[in-house]
Amino acid sequence: MRLTERQSDALSELINIAFARTGAALSELTGHRVVLNPPEVAVYRTEELRGALAKFVPGDVASIHQVFAGPVAGDALLLLNYEGAVHLTDLLTDESKSSNYLDESAREVLTEVGNILLNACLGMFGNLLHVHVTFSVPRLHLETLDELLASITTNKSEMHYALVIYTAFQIRDSSVKGFLVIVLSVASLDRLIQEVDAWEARQGG
Amino acid sequence: MESPGPVRMKDTSSKERLLNAAVLHWMHDLAAQGIVTTDSDLNVVEWNHWMEQHTGKRAGEVIGYNLLELFPELTQRRLDRHYKWALEGQVRVLSQGLHGYLIAMPAVSSELGYSQMQQAVRISPLAHEGRVIGTLTIIEDVTERVAREAELQAQIEERSRLLASEKLARNDAERANRLKDEFLATISHELRNPLNAILGWAHMMRLGTLTPANTERAVETIYRNAQSQAQLVADLLDVSRIISGKLSLDVRTVDLISIVNAAVDSIRPSVEAKSIRLQTMLDPAAGPISGDANRLQQVVWNLLTNAVKFTPTGGHVEVKLQRIESHVEIVVSDSGVGISKEFLPYVFDRFRQADASTTRIHGGLGLGLSIVRQLVDLHGGTVSVHSEGEGKGATFTITLPFVGVVSNQNDAEPAHPAQSDDINTLEGLPSLQGLKVLVVDDEADTRELISEVLKECGSEVITSRSAAEALEALERHKPNILISDLGMPDEDGYSLISKIRALPSERGGHIPAAALTAYARAEDRMRVLRSGFQYHLPKPVDSAELVTVVASLAGLAYKT
């Protein structure tokens, strides 16, 4: 399944609304202007994810993972490479000296950031699809990309797709790259794309 | 894979009901976290024991009340939104790093440096059949963890700081070592150069084949080279004395004009050889000062030699001597090669030359300016350098403290009794006839010895055992001269002289004074002079020196 250019643009625009909300929330929390770059969206089959993400995250990955359930169900993750995760927490918590590891407090800050972003995106999808989704408590994992992908793709009998949204946090003259990965069943993705088409048609009209 | 969060409530068997009741009981009484549940209007339904303990609010005081009304701070800090979102079905994470805490509670122990308990918080919706019917808040005390992490972070930073400073120190040591190596190479080179000429000409003289004219030239060359080598060795010895703290000054009243003139005279041949225009501007009001004439001449000579060395043929060098308030300034400026901004801070460093390469144009050991600085330091003065950059000349400025030695006879020559009277009473020493000397020392032996010597030379002597006694004697006897010990119990000589110098002239404030001390280091001597004494007499006292000093003091009055 591939998105048409129009679908991709429409989805990017929708996600951008959620990103703007996230940026505003983080700016207010930290007292610094935080902007998330306009997203780039692509759809992969979960088996292709590894290849798509490998060049971005060669080492350890920090992921904030929330499971959502309801008429549309799946996994939502914010992915950062380890250095990016350290850098982002330093920027958000005003650490003047740069740390080189994530302590418990830093992990918690990351979890909150992921929570804000994932809630904004999933909330936006929920509104678009007129469905109510429920969320699990977000969890932060530090692992290799392979371990992470294995944890997403195991025990899934149904074929799944991953919506991969590329962005970067702009804060205090620095930029930290990140990936948002939303894993959906074929049915859920179909439904989402239909709604995106409908939304796009409403915007056009 | 964990299942989504909302706590499900459904009809249960009686066993399950019992278990659920036990879980609720555990959450209420035993949980090590704060647990708060509200209904969908945010009215408190559950407030566990932990919350009671840490907020001081009993469950009975809060249950049934609206959480946001109980804690208005939540709304003020815009945290009420998280409850709104939870009621919409979102799970919210509130990290300590970004919020500090949700509900203010005092820290369990103040030892960790936090007065408020630091909290990690989760706020979740409680749903029943897809409908949110309330919220669940879990509060964890993370104060200790946060403090421990901060401590760890500080340790890591300290360690990397130490590593960095260690690296810096190692670099410094390596650089110093390199400088010494370069210096050794330079020294060998500079000592060998004159030696080549000396050996070469001496060899030819031994062969006896030189014409009389060439012989004369040979002797001249050998002499000149030997002299230049002697100068190198003298510089080296000076540096070694400075390093070991053994360089001492022979401090007397010196006339800077004649010192500068002497230095200018000795440099004149090389000035003329390079057709350099040498200008001197010497202010007669500048001298005299207290200092070591030979060393001050060396200072001026070094600066002049330097200026001439680095000034190309046809350039000009200027020497200025002027009095500026309480200082005397000697300024040597040239139109020479100048000094780059990068090298400027290192000009006075030992073993440093801007061009340390073996092919450098200008010879020398790079010691001259370092000696200048050390000698000026010993005189209590400063030396500074200014240059607009390479090719733009350089200006060296020396300031020396003007210690207030002036004649008390309207700028006429001091009338030393020694010069006006030929009656010598102590082995040809000058007479001190008509002088009244106040001697202050806590040691009776020294007091007696000094008064004996002075009386022998015809002066009247008053003695005091302490600074207090001396001040009294000064008022009562109006002596002409003061000789005071420095180290005395209760009040020392420095304190005495500063009190005296604060007095008006008619009460003895300007009395000429010499200090007696066993401290012979140069910095002690400088302190003596700066504190208001004109002379420094080392112990044990030499009779002849004592009488000479008193005689010369007789011609002087202290002037501020």
Image: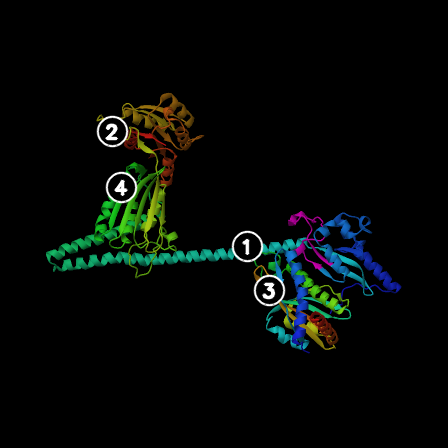
Q: Position of residue B105 (x, y in %)?
A: 72, 49
- Please give the name of the residue rendered at 33% of the width and 60% of the height, measured from the top-left corner: B357
Q: Give, as a single range, the part of the protein colored magenta.
A: B93-122
Q: Secondary structure at mark 2?
A: helix
Instruction: Say yes or no: labels 2 and 4 on the same chain.
Output: yes
Circle 1 is placed at which residue position?
B158
Between label 3 and label 4, give the one nearer the viewer: 3
- Please give the name of the residue rendered at 13% of the width and 57% of the height, measured from the top-left corner: B214
Question: Front-most of B313 and B170?
Answer: B313
Is the C terminus of chain B in the top left, top right, bottom left or bottom right quadrant? Answer: top left
Q: Which class describes the residues within 10 Å of circle 3: few (<14), some (14-19), or many (20+)?
A: some
Q: Position of residue B154 (x, y in %)?
A: 58, 54
As measured in the structure, the alpha-carbon distance from the residue carrying label 2 to the one carrying label 1 is 69 Å
Circle 4 is placed at which residue position?
B259
Between label 2 and label 3, give the one nearer the viewer: 3
Q: Amino acid at mark 1?
A: Glu
- Please give the name of the residue rendered at 58% of the width and 63% of the height, measured from the top-left corner: A175
Q: Amino acid at mark 4?
A: Ile
Numbered mark located on residue A124 in the image:
none
Q: Amino acid at mark 2?
A: Ala
As measured in the structure, the alpha-carbon distance from the residue carrying label 3 to the one carrying label 1 is 27 Å
From what the image shows, is residue B238 above or below residue B557? below
Parent chain of label 4: B
> Which of pointers 4 and 1 lies earlier in the amino acid sequence?
1
Is the N terminus of chain B in the top left, top right, bottom left or bottom right quadrant? Answer: bottom right
As measured in the structure, the alpha-carbon distance from the residue carrying label 4 to the one carrying label 1 is 55 Å
Circle 2 is placed at which residue position?
B418
Decide: marks 2, 3 in contact (CB < 8 A)?
no
Q: Secondary structure at mark 1?
A: helix
Numbered mark located on residue A176 in the image:
3
